[in-house]
Image: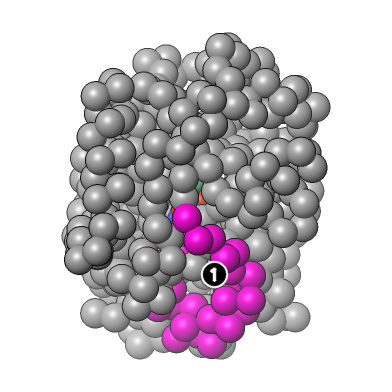
C-alpha cells in the first residue's frame, strides 16, 4: 500500500513513521526548502505522549525534554505576579508531561523515518484526482504520484483541504487573537531568566520568554486583535502591540527586527464534520486544529496519525477512514470547546481577570491544594490512543 503525504510537519512526519511501521510505502511533499528548525516550546502530554510511547519513541522525546521548574507570570517591571509550579504539575500528571521545542519534535520524527521514505522538499500538489480505489496527484514540478491514500497534513491553512473540501472560510473559526513566535540570542536576557520561563501579562496581551540551555531564547506571544489581517511585517506589528511595555520587551523587539523567520498567525480552530473524502484524508491542524488555547495540537496531530495507522493496519481504507473520524471526533470537539473556554484565562481581558488568575495559581502552591492543579490539567491526559 502506498501513501502520499502533503506536509512534513508534526502530523505528516508522524503519519509517515506510523504507516511505514505497518508496511506502507510513503512519499512526502513539503513546500519548505528543508526541515524547519524554528519553533516554540510545546507542552506534550495525552494522545501524542501515548502514541510515541507505543511506537518506542518515548526515550528520544525524553532526551529532548527541557527541564522547567516553574512558569512565572511577571508585570511590566519584571516583578513576579504568580507562579505555576511546573514540577508539581508534572507530578500531578504522573510525569507524563514533557516540554519540547516544536523543531525538536519534528527532528525526532524525521530521524525516526525509514530510509525508504521519499521526502521531496520545495514541493507541493497542484491537482488531486480521486479514482475510487486510488488517488492521483499532480505535483508542482509537473510529475504525477498515484497512491492508495493521500494525507493532507499541511497545517491550519491546508492547501489539500482547499483543493478537496473547499474554501478555508467554511471551516476556520477565528478566536480573536494573533500569535507569534521566534528565537534569538541575548546573553543578558538569558542570564536574567536563569533557565526559566517567564510570561509578561497585561490585559489582552501576553509575551512569553524561555531561556534554553544552549543560549537561545524562545518567545511566543498572544494578543487580542479583532482584525483578520496578517501583517506584511510581523516585527513591525509586534512593536505596535508591545512597544509601550517594559521588562525585556524593548530588547526583544529589537531582536525581532533582525529575525527573518518570525512565526505569525491567527489563533483559530478548524471545524469540519468530515475529515475524509474518497481516498483523501486530513490529519492534524489541517483537519481539527484545536489552537494554542487548548494546548494540545501537536499531541492530537501525533495521536491522530497513530490511530489512523492502527486502523489502516486492521481494515480496508474506506472503513479505516470512517472509523478514524468516529474515534477522534468527540475528543477534538471537547478540546476545541475547552480551548475557547480558556481564552479569558490564557489572555485575560482585564486587570481583574489577571488578578483572579494570580490568586488561583498562587493558591495551587499552598500545602494541600495541589488537587486544584491536578483538576486543571487532568483533561490534557485524556487520550484517543488508549481507547
Ligand atoms: C505558540 C504556539 C504554542 C503551541 N503550544 C502547543 C502545546 O503546548 N502543546 C501542543 O500539543 N500543541 C501546541 N501548539 C500547536 C501545535 O504546534 C500544532 O497543533 C502542530 O504543530 C500542528 O502540526 P501539523 O503538522 O498538523 O501542522 P503544521 O505544524 O502547520 O505543519 C504543516 C506542514 O505542512 C507544510 N505545508 C503547508 N502548506 C503546504 C503545501 N501547500 N504543500 C506542502 N507542504 C505544505 C508546512 O510547511 C509544514 O511543514 C502550539 C502552537 C503555537 C503556535
Residue at the extreme front:
367
- Residue 219, by quadrant, is top right
Q: Is residue 301 visible?
A: no
Give how far across and how far down residue 309 sits, in percent.
44, 77
The image's colouring method is one colour
Question: For this view, does 229 lie left or right of residue 232?
Answer: left
Question: For this view, does 379 lie left or right of residue 221?
Answer: left
Residue 84 lies in magenta, yes or no? no
Viewer-side residue, 67 vs 261: 67
**Residue drawn 26% across and 58% down?**
366
Which quarter of the rendering shows the C terminus? Answer: bottom left
Magenta extent? 44-70
**Residue drawn 54% across and 87% down?**
56
Pointer 1 local density, CA inside 10 Å: few below 14, some 14–19, many at least 20? many
Give how far across and how far down residue 377 sits, in percent.
28, 60
Residue 61 lies in magenta, yes or no? yes
Question: For this view, does 327 lie left or right of residue 180?
Answer: left
Q: Is residue 381 visible?
A: yes
**Residue drawn 23% across and 35% down?**
356
- Above or below 114: residue 351: above
Give how far across and how far down residue 245 sits, in percent.
55, 17
- Above or below 309: residue 193: above
Give how far across and how far down residue 319 sits, in percent.
29, 74
Question: Is the residue indicated by label 1 positioned so its CB lies within 8 Å of ligand 1?
Answer: yes
Q: Which residue is mark 1?
A: 14
Amino acid at each position: 500500500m502506498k501513501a502520499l503525504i502533503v506536509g512534513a510537519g508534526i502530523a505528516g512526519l508522524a503519519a509517515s513513521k506510523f504507516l511505514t511501521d505497518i508496511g506502507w510505502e510513503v512519499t512526502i511533499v513539503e513546500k519548505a526548502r528543508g526541515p524547519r528548525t524554528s519553533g516554540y516550546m510545546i507542552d506534550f502530554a495525552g494522545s501524542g505522549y501515548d502514541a510515541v510511547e507505543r511506537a518506542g519513541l518515548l526515550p528520544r522525546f525524553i532526551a529532548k525534554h527541557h527541564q522547567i521548574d516553574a512558569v512565572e507570570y511577571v508585570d511590566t517591571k519584571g516583578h513576579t505576579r504568580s507562579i505555576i509550579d511546573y514540577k508539581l504539575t508534572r507530578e500531578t500528571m504522573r510525569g507524563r508531561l514533557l516540554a519540547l521545542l516544536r523543531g525538536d519534535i519534528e527532528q525526532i520524527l524525521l530521524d525516526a523515518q525509514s530510509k525508504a521514505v521519499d521526502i521531496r522538499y520545495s514541493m507541493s500538489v497542484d491537482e488531486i484526482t480521486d479514482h475510487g480505489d486510488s488517488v492521483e496527484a499532480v505535483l508542482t514540478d509537473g510529475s504525477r504520484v498515484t497512491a492508495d491514500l493521500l494525507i493532507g497534513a499541511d497545517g491550519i491553512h491546508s492547501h489539500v483541504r482547499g483543493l478537496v473540501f473547499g474554501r478555508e472560510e467554511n471551516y476556520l473559526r477565528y478566536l480573536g487573537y494573533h500569535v507569534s513566535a521566534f528565537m534569538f540570542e541575548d546573553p543578558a536576557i538569558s542570564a536574567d531568566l536563569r533557565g526559566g520561563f517567564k510570561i509578561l501579562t497585561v490585559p489582552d496581551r501576553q509575551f512569553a520568554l524561555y531561556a534554553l540551555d544552549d543560549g537561545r531564547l524562545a518567545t511566543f506571544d498572544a494578543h487580542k486583535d479583532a482584525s483578520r489581517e496578517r501583517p506584511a511585517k510581523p516585527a513591525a506589528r509586534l512593536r505596535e502591540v508591545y512597544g509601550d511595555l517594559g521588562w525585556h520587551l524593548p530588547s526583544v523587539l529589537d531582536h525581532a527586527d533582525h529575525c527573518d523567520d518570525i512565526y505569525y498567525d491567527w489563533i483559530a480552530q478548524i471545524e469540519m464534520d468530515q475529515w475524509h473524502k474518497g481516498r483523501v484524508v486530513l490529519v492534524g491542524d489541517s483537519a481539527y486544529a484545536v489552537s494554542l488555547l487548548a494546548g494540545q495540537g501537536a499531541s492530537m496531530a501525533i495521536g491522530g496519525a497513530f490511530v489512523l495507522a492502527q486502523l489502516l493496519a486492521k481494515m480496508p481504507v474506506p472503513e479505516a477512514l470512517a472509523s478514524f473520524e468516529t474515534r477522534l471526533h468527540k475528543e477534538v470537539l471537547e478540546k476545541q470547546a475547552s480551548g475557547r473556554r480558556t481564552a479569558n484565562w490564557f489572555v485575560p481581558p482585564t486587570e481583574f481577570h489577571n488578578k483572579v488568575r494570580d490568586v488561583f495559581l498562587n493558591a495551587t502552591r499552598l500545602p494541600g491544594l495541589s488537587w486544584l492543579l491536578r483538576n486543571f490539567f487532568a483533561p490534557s491526559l485524556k487520550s484517543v490512543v488508549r481507547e
